[in-house]
Image (spheres, rainbow, N blue to C red):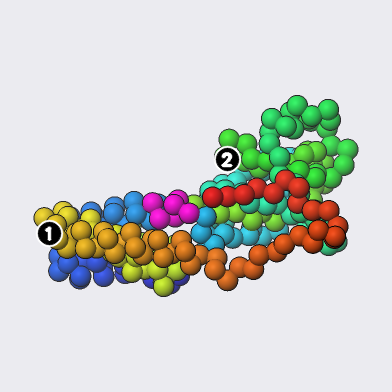
Amino acid sequence: MSTTFAAFVSAIQNEINDSDAAMKTRIEGWVNDLMHRICSSHRWQWLITTSASTLIKSSNHPYTLSSLSTKCRTVLDVRDEDDSPPKPLYPTTEDAVRNSLFQYTSATNSPSWWYVQADVSLGLFPIPDTTGRNYTIRYIQQYVSLGTGSTTALLLPDRWLEVLKDAVLSKAYSWLDKDNKALKHEAAFQGGLKAMKAQDGENQQAIYQNQFGPPDIFPNEIVFP
């Protein structure tokens, strides 16, 4: 992921042989819109990241997800790093916590569950005490639109830049009333996006539970499409 936003926009302008400032603005908008479209279309492995160890205690609970180094789209799991070995917390919901028989605002034990409030904050249950504990949060990043001339690297592996390029060229040629070229690049984009989804995570190994082994330690596993 090393190609910058500005360099990519410049490459598109070179491709269509149009260095007009107004066209540059259009291309930047298309790049941002299409990056949002691509990133939100799938649970991409290259968008998954893990936060640094973070102290969460009663004074900063619930933990604001905007405090993470990159914008969070979906929390995948939370791990207590102070346990040895580190302990994964179980996912739950705010409704389940509020309807539990335990006191919602009292912490008598270290948290064992996590949940997300209104997509903006991370809740733990029981609520952490004043000392708190250190946690890592694994999550799917959300694309953030980049400003004109930004030298920030695109949130897309370089091997898939041609897919984004086809998508943007389709928009550009459609704007220039070159419909044949626009349709050609749109078809290439759709085919490339399909290939991306097929190959994403292809190196991951499936883990199957031994029917004679210990019980499943992840009873509340969440399955994403």
Instruction: Look at 66% across and 60% down and name the residue there.
Output: 52
Magenta stretch containing residue 106, yes or no? no
On screen, residue 205 versus residue 35, left or right, reads: right
| Camera-nearest residue between 192 and 122 | 192
Q: Position of residue 36 (x, y in %)?
A: 40, 52
- Magenta residues (range): 37-42
Relative height, residue 170 to residue 2 (above, below): above
Q: Identify the residue under disc 2.
A: 120
Query: Is the residue under label 1 in contact with that under label 2 (CB below 8 Å)?
Result: no
Instruction: Look at 60% across and 46% down and name the residue there.
Output: 65
The single residue placed furthest to the right in the displayed view is 108
Relative height, residue 19 to residue 144 (above, below): below
Q: Position of residue 1 (x, y in %)?
A: 45, 70
Q: Position of residue 108 (x, y in %)?
A: 88, 38
Relative height, residue 196 to residue 42 (above, below): below
Q: Is label 2 or label 1 in front?
A: 1
Residue type pointed to by label 1 = Lys
Whether residue 8 is visible: yes
| Camera-nearest residue between 137 and 196 | 196
Instruction: Look at 55% across and 65% down and name the residue there.
Output: 201
Q: Identify the residue under disc 1.
A: 178
